[in-house]
Image (spheres, rainbow, N blue to C red):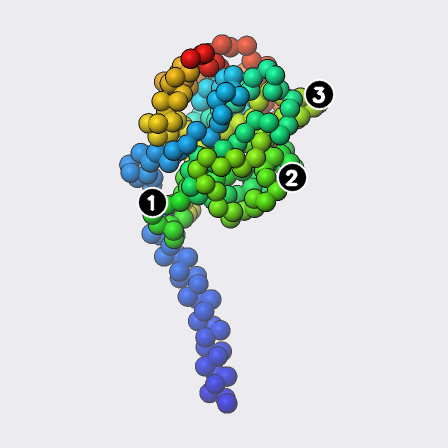
Amino acid sequence: MASERSFKLRWLLVIPLLIVAFYLVMGFKYSGPVTKDELNQKFVVINPLDLSQIKGFSKYRSCMGHDYRGPLVDSEKESTPRSMKHYVKVKEELGGKNGVVKAIAPFNGRISNFEKKDPERKPYDQQVWLTPDTGDPVSPRLWHFVFFHIDVRDDLKEGSPVKAGEVIGTAYMTRGPQNFTDNFDMAVKFTRPGASPAIDFPMDHFSDEVLSEYAKVGITPENMTISKEYRDQNSCPTTGESLGGDVYFTPNTDPNDMIFLQTP
């Protein structure tokens, strides 16, 4: 009996050590820099938006909204405030209307996160991260497509599987002091052990088929981004107010910050 108790005690001591060792090995194995193959992954195989509902986009590195930066997948955080995501501007007749503007899963995958640190988070106004299926289900090195301000379907939770083309929810359009807005947001991030989530230009990960849909309405990777060199030399004006530490930009009239869809 004593030997049996001793055996169980040894295992109670060993199991935590094995768990720690497992995570240390996983961290070491998967914490390296983003590889060329990872940078070249085209995981957005279905348009995440119904372009018939969309009027235009803010450009990557625009001065729209508020500062949105972080480490990049292939370099450090850029030096001055800029918005490294896209605001999606809906058509006039859809502004302020909930339950209409679709958020679409752009790949087969799962809902990996409802961002709990988002200061604007409400049950009907979520920042939702979608993560594509990979060939290595154990790997913690993951791409994410992120929607902001989405009223997600009630049946979808963290971990829920999603299929490419599935409508996961709709944009929450009665935000702000007037209970009216004409935009929501989208971004792309990459996560790996030992590093903060890294940002990348979303269209770099669109398949050729999805890129062709955008090209038909005059949207290309070239005209959806502002160069780092230009933004470094032309700082975004800020108000001094902030959201979760990210400073707000002054109301913007710079036509270079937006791109509008052309009628096919």
In the displayed structure image, the side of residue 254 where residue 21 appears, left or right: left
Q: Is mark 2 on a helix, strand or loop?
A: loop
Q: Mark 3 points at which residue?
A: 178
Q: Is residue 207 left or right of residue 156?
A: left
Pick whichever, 131 or 13, lies toward us. 131
Q: Mark 2 points at which residue?
A: 123
Q: In this view, does 131 lie to the left or right of 40?
A: right
Which numbered disc, 2 or 1, marks the residue that appears first in the sequence? 1
For badge 3, the amino acid type reads Gln
Quadrant in the rendering for residue 189: top left
Q: Nearer the viewer, residue 122 or 33?
A: 122
Picture coordinates of residue 94, whole percent (x, y):
60, 20
Q: How many labels does the image show?
A: 3
Of tags 2 and 1, which is closer to the observer?
Answer: 2
Q: Decide which of tag 2 and tag 3 comes sooner along the chain.
A: 2
Q: Is residue 9 left or right of residue 97?
A: left
> Which residue does the image show at 67% across and 26% down from the upper left?
174
Q: Name the residue under label 1.
A: 32
The amino acid type of the residue labelled 2 equals Pro
Which residue is drawn at the image coordinates 46% and 35% (left, top)?
A: 165
Q: Which residue is drawn at 48% across and 14% down?
A: 260
Residue 136: x, y in percent?
A: 35, 50
User: Residue 171: x and y, percent?
Assistant: 58, 29
